Image (cartoon, grey):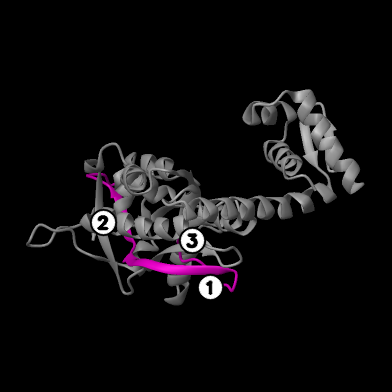
């Protein structure tokens, strides 16, 4: 099997189009089509269904796509290790970040990466935990920062931080519920989880990690959330909270994504606290390169430093 042909097929299958793949690979479309066809002839399988809108993998194509990603990843690992023999860290590292953290750490992580591994290539992808876990499984991601990742023999996890979720409310507004009272010190008073359950909440849809965690803690004390809106977008959730459409339950550093954090108030949740684990995860089925090991150190230090002010 020709590795170049395999790479061409994987790119066409991922992009769903010979035209887009030819642009990405910088190869003429007729030549690209010919190489993919030669691979089909060699394997005696139809790998792609050509349509007027693009190309869709057949069942055989889906199977080859799954294995092909892993094969190409191992080739990259081998090349990187050979480069390391000559000295210096090289190769590519693909890291997935959750929306709540991406704005806070993208710049410092990129700067640290360039300073300490100038010959390596960094790819950052933003996404929710369920999508990033799939990315780790199929080989699209080398590392991912996830919340409350499942324990699995296929995944290696490092806990970066255990933190509590807080109630994020619109400032000086009663449209979404009772205003947060201040104590004698001027700080916002904590609120019980049972009281949070009575408020109109803006939550992501299942299987979002925060949604599952909030519902689980409420069920444990005999109540359930009053879901006013289901919204799968961090900026959209904050915008709706700011407009008084409801409250959110998220980490406090989530407000680093807001244009004006002064439009919000934060309240600690008690009885019980909602504790979430922030984890760095990689696939245990793939060899870890020296570049990836260094990237793990960088991600850990950058994340911990970035969220320290929000403790």
Question: What x and y, as percent, mark residue 155?
Answer: 55, 68
The residues bearing labels 1 and 3 have C-alpha atoms spaced at a distance of 14 Å
Question: Which labelled disc corresponds to residue 73?
Answer: none
Q: Is residue 43 left or right of residue 240?
A: right
Tell whether label 2 touches label 1 (CB within 8 Å): no
Q: Mark 2 or mark 3, which is nearer the start of the sequence?
A: 3
- Name the residue located 7 percent from the left edge and 62 percent from the top edge: 184
Q: Residues within 10 Å of mark 1 (few under 14, many from 20)?
A: few
Residue projecting furthest to the left = 184
Q: Compared to 98, does 184 lie above or below? A: below
Question: What x and y, as percent, mark residue 204?
Answer: 49, 52
Question: In front: mark 3 or mark 2?
Answer: 2
- Name the residue located 88 percent from the left edge and 48 percent from the top edge: 43
Q: On the image, numbered disc 2 is attached to which residue?
A: 305
Q: Mark 2 or mark 1, which is nearer the start of the sequence?
A: 1
Q: Which residues are magenta?
A: 145-174
Q: Is residue 109 left or right of residue 35?
A: left
Residue 52 seen in render? yes
- Name the residue located 52 percent from the left edge and 62 percent from the top edge: 288
Quarter occupied by residue 19: top right
Secondary structure at badge 1 equals loop
Q: On the image, numbered disc 3 is attached to which residue?
A: 209
The residues bearing labels 3 and 2 have C-alpha atoms spaced at a distance of 23 Å
- In the rendered structure, does residue 242 fall within the stretch colored magenta? no
Question: What x and y, as percent, mark residue 297?
Answer: 36, 60
- Name the residue located 49 percent from the left edge and 50 percent from the top edge: 93
């Amino acid at each position: 099997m020709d590795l170049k042909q395999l790479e061409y097929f994987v790119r066409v299958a991922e992009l769903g189009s010979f035209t887009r793949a030819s642009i990405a690979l910088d190869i003429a479309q007729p030549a690209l089509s010919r190489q993919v066809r030669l691979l089909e002839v060699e394997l005696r399988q139809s790998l792609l269904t050509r349509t007027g809108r693009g190309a869709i993998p057949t069942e055989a194509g889906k199977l080859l796509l799954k294995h092909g990603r892993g094969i190409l990843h191992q080739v990259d690992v081998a090349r990187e290790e050979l480069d390391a023999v000559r000295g210096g860290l090289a190769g590519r590292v693909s890291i997935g970040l959750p929306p709540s953290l991406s704005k806070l750490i993208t710049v410092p992580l990129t700067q640290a990466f360039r300073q300490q591994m100038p010959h390596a290539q960094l790819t950052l992808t933003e996404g929710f935990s369920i999508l990033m876990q799939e990315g780790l499984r199929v080989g699209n991601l080398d590392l991912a920062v996830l919340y409350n990742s499942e324990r699995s023999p296929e995944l290696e996890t490092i806990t970066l931080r255990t933190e509590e979720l807080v109630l994020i409310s619109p400032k000086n507004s009663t449209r979404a519920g009772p205003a947060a009272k201040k104590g004698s010190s001027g700080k916002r008073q904590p609120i019980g989880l049972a009281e949070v359950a009575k408020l109109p909440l803006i939550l992501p849809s299942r299987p979002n990690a925060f949604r599952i965690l909030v519902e689980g803690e409420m069920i444990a004390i005999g109540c359930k959330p009053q879901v006013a809106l289901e919204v799968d977008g961090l900026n959209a959730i904050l915008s709706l909270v700011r407009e008084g459409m409801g409250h959110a339950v998220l980490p406090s550093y989530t407000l680093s994504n807001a244009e004006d954090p002064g439009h919000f108030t934060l309240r600690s949740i008690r009885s019980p606290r909602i504790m979430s684990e922030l984890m760095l995860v990689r696939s245990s089925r793939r060899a870890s390169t020296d570049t990836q090991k260094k990237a793990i150190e960088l991600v850990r230090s950058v994340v911990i430093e970035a969220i320290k002010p929000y403790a």
